[in-house]
Amino acid sequence: MIQLTPSHVQSIRQHGEADFPHECCGILVGIFGEDGAKQVREILPISNAREEEAKRNRFLITAEEMMRGEKLARAQGMDVIGFYHSHPDHPAKPSQFDLDHAWPIYSYIIVSVMGGQSADFTSWELDPEGEAFVSEEILEKGGE
Ligand SMILES: [Zn+2]
């Protein structure tokens, strides 16, 4: 399970709409709970400075961006707990590319943006074998 606030959800939806028809992506910073639930505390949007084709077809976090995320997280005693990205004009389901580039433990939030309007909002994590994504429950609550 992953927990985030309504304003986090709003930020991710808005990022997806702003970058449409390109994919947006970002890093989820927060805490791995003892009960296996993750808590998002901060959203780190990644400015999409990639090539045109990559922007449209792929979700990829560079090593540099990952390091920036981990630095920011550690400075606050937190961790990188996952990532989010948008699927412009596609369902909020992970692609084969997403699966091939996923790491265990992390959450992968996907927001579908249909015709510029954010729609389905889902979260996924790898199964223990690392061979497939399983749907992860999203708990939207709290606020700052
Ligand atoms: Zn994707």
Image: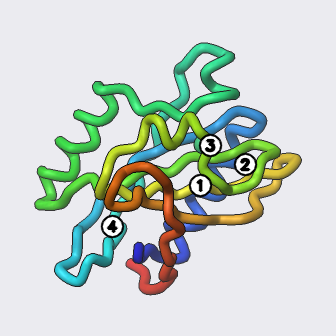
Q: Which amino acid does label 2 sit on?
A: Glu
Q: Earlier in the sequence, mark 3 or mark 4?
A: 4
Residue 14 lies in quadrant:
bottom right
Q: What element carries label 2?
A: helix
Q: Which amino acid does label 4 sit on?
A: Arg
The residue furthest right is 115
- Determine which residue is flagged by label 1: 110
Disc 3: residue Cβ within 8 A of ligand 1's nearest atom:
yes
- Callout in the foreground (3, 4): 3
Q: Distance between the residues labelled 3 and 1?
A: 10 Å
- Which label number is shown at residue 17? 2
Judge whether 47 appears above or below 72 on screen.
above
Q: Please name whichever residue, 37 or 97, is drawn nearer the observer in this view of the structure.
A: 97
Residue 138: give x, y in percent of width and height.
Answer: 51, 76
24 left or right of 128 in image: right
Q: Which amino acid does label 3 sit on?
A: Ser
